[in-house]
Image (cartoon, rainbow, N blue to C red):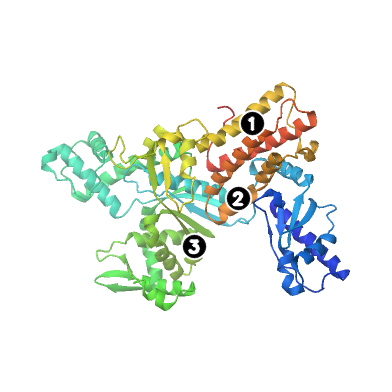
Amino acid sequence: MANLIQYAKDQVTECTRKAYEAAAAAGVLPAGVELKGSVEIPKDPQNGDYASSYAMAGAKAMKMNPRAIAQALADHMDLEGTIFSSVEIAGPGFMNFRLGSKWYGDVLADIEAEGRLYGQGKDGAGQKVMVEFVSANPTGPMHMGNARGGVLGDTLANVLQRDGFDTWKEFYVNDAGNQINKFAVSIQARYLQILLGEENVEFPEDGYHGQDIKDLAQGFYEKHGDSFRDVDEQTRLDALAAYGLEHNIPKMKEDLRRYGIEYDQWFFESSLHQSGYVAETVGMLTEKGWTYEKDGALWLKTSDLLKTKFLAEGKSQKQIDKLELKDDVLRRANGFYTYFAADIAYHRNKLEVRGFDKVINIWGADHHGHVARLQAALDGLGLDGSHRLVVVLMQLVNLLQDGQPVRMSKRSGKAIALHDLLDEVSVDAARYFFNSRSSTSPVDFDLGLAVREDSENPVYYVQYAHARICTLIARLAEEGHQVPAAADIRAELLSTEEEKALVRTLARLPDEIRAAARDYDPSRINRYLIELAGDFHRFYGACRIKGEEPDVLAARLKLADSVRSVLANCLNLLGVTAPEKM
């Protein structure tokens, strides 16, 4: 499949090069000048479909007026056999090219040939890329932040795959360390309160206070009774932690499956400790001279690693000195490894053992301080973390109800849980809204807007365009009009500005996918869908299909069906359905 926008730009360059050679051979332009310039798409179609700046860029070297250069180029330009119908000179020396009907037909032919894969690219060239996302602590239900990270990671992986990357989706289960200990201690307090009375057992101030902890304690009691009342505390905590995880992790999987997310692997932090991989990784850092002992603990020379990283990135020593860099503990005085040590080991496993070319993590913006530290630690292991680890930081979600903030969950009294949200709005709306803005911007999720069935609701607006086309095609089929093959239509009949604008938008999808993959910004697909749906609705309002002359009907029907195909294609990338009726 050709990227027909890039193809058009390349053809402008090639036509201009040949025109320059012909003009130079005729003595109209000086020979031996390297032709430089750019080709852009004008914002206003009145200025042509593509505009080049070659004449202006060559003025200094040729010592000529840009318009005179442009005129010479235009006079010697042969557009025969190209996708362009004309070239015009405008302003100080722009050359504006207008597309011929062949290009418009080629776009529809490409969409037909590629089907659901239309827009695919080769930038990834088969590189192995892991996208790790959500990775919520399994100590409670998933909340709104996890909901945004889920759709962002899932959609980004889909976009990367469409751009040629070999993608892998992973959930990292933090089933070890302080959080799990606090989880067990919290359940223990509720369990003992059941046995001994709430007034006789103090609940830890920093424990987990949600109703889900009480439910787990009650479930544990119903299964085991008082058999864990008099055992040693560590035995009790181990049993409670295992029980809690056995119940929470399947619920997380169920919620994410309901949300349309399936992972290639759920990777457990505990496996890194049990296999000795964390200890081995820390040992490697020690062998490379990046650790030291202090106060009984083992420390990573994070500040030295960061200095090396920042200097390589072009920061000055003066800038680095202002950062007040600090070192990190890898192994505490009690012999336990820190979460940071396990995180380094996990990412070493990704890059070294499993051989991913690049790993992408979706993290909340509050983790920004951890990014450079982890990259530097991987640099210290010789794994080039500064380039192979990419962290996409996402901003918060503001939950609204008809424009007013919603702060409390009806069930838990705390953060809105994912399963609560999906009881209120459809999966389609949730996935679309959470991916509607770049990760660097907060998302305002309005529950009232998400359930509206009108054009104000963006996901409804896009899905309605798809359903509208499906209904049109079905009705015309009843009258004997089938969607024709691209080769069987007369593309020159797509002559109105609404028709041409719609085809030009269809042609942009390969560039949108490439840019979304390059910038790790799948929200570009949302914005593209809104634009495509809008262009279709304008076309449908301005250009009659039913009742038109057969050739015009066929061309417009093919155009409408191409839009249907691309809408479904992009909705699928977002994990959103493309309904045929609404």
Q: Residue furthest right?
A: 26
Q: Is residue 463 above or below residue 162?
A: above
Residue pictured at 25% horizontal, 46% vertical: 208
Mark 1 → mark 2, Cα distance in angstroms: 23 Å
* Residue 523: % across, % down: 52, 48
Quarter in which the C terminus is drawn: top right
Mark 2 → mark 3, Cα distance in angstroms: 32 Å
Disc 1 vs disc 3: which is toward the camera? 1
The residue under label 3 is 352
Q: Residue furthest top?
A: 478
Which sits earlier in the primary sequence, circle 2 or circle 3? 3
For mark 1, give the secondary structure.
helix
The residue under label 1 is 469
For mark 2, give the secondary structure.
helix
Question: Label 3 sits on what residue type?
Answer: Glu
240 and 186: which is toward the camera: 186
Q: Is residue 276 visible?
A: no
* Residue 390: % across, % down: 48, 59
The residue under label 2 is 512
556 and 111: which is toward the camera: 556
518 and 216: which is toward the camera: 518
